[in-house]
């Protein structure tokens, strides 16, 4: 399965998990980049107080600016398997990472 094919349930609908929704601080004149623009900078496991399931927090960089996104999906693959693949491709484009098999 390609990373871009990861999905999760949202109510009765199944929605795409890739690319994640990216957030950052913005100032006057800032342009919000395309969701697949930029390179992957880091991958970290996170756990929300409201959800016992672990997720992956991703950081991407676009033109020197960092954006954070939480990657949530319904297994398979396991969080460990996806974490290994993503960490092996740090510094690569978000668009190319979506095409990787996991």
Image (tube, rainbow, N blue to C red):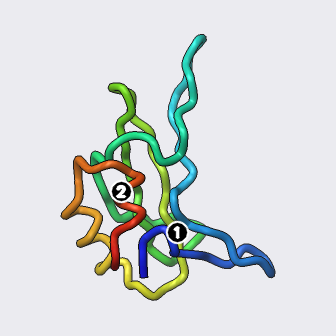
Q: Position of residue 23 (x, y in %)?
A: 54, 40
Q: Position of residue 33 (x, y in %)?
A: 52, 34
- State the residue at coordinates (30%, 80%): 81
Residue 22 lies, with reference to residue 101, above or below; the image says above
Q: Mark 2 or 1 closer to N-term?
A: 1
Q: Quadrant of the N terminus?
A: bottom left
Question: Secondary structure beneath disc 1?
Answer: loop
Q: Quadrant of residue 14?
A: bottom right
- State the residue at coordinates (36%, 26%): 63
Q: Nearer the viewer, residue 30 or 47?
A: 30
**Residue most toward the top?**
28
Residue 41 lies, with reference to residue 97, above or below; the image says above
Numbered tag placed on residue 94 in the rendering:
none
- State the residue at coordinates (38%, 40%): 38
Q: Which residue is mark 2?
A: 96
- State the residue at coordinates (52%, 74%): 5
**Residue most toward the bottom?**
76
Residue 37 lies, with reference to residue 51, above or below; the image says above
Q: Which residue is mark 1?
A: 72
Q: Are marks 2 and 1 in contact (CB under 8 Å)?
A: no
Residue 21 lies, with reference to residue 3, above or below; the image says above
Q: Nearer the viewer, residue 43 or 64?
A: 64
Q: Position of residue 24 (x, y in %)?
A: 51, 34
Q: Position of residue 70 (x, y in %)?
A: 49, 57
**Disc 1: CA contacts within 10 A as few (<14), some (14-19) or many (>=20):** many
Q: Nearer the viewer, residue 81 or 56?
A: 81
């Amino acid at each position: 399965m390609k990373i871009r094919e990861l999905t999760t349930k949202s109510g009765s609908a199944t929605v795409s998990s890739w690319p994640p929704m990216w957030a950052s601080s913005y100032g006057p004149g800032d342009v919000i980049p395309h969701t697949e623009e930029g390179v992957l900078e880091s991958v970290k496991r996170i756990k929300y107080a409201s959800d016992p399931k672990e997720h992956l927090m991703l950081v991407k960089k676009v033109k020197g600016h960092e954006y954070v996104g939480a990657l949530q999906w319904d297994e398979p693959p396991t969080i460990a398997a996806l974490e290994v693949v993503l960490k092996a491709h740090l510094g690569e484009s978000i668009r190319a990472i979506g095409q990787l098999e996991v």
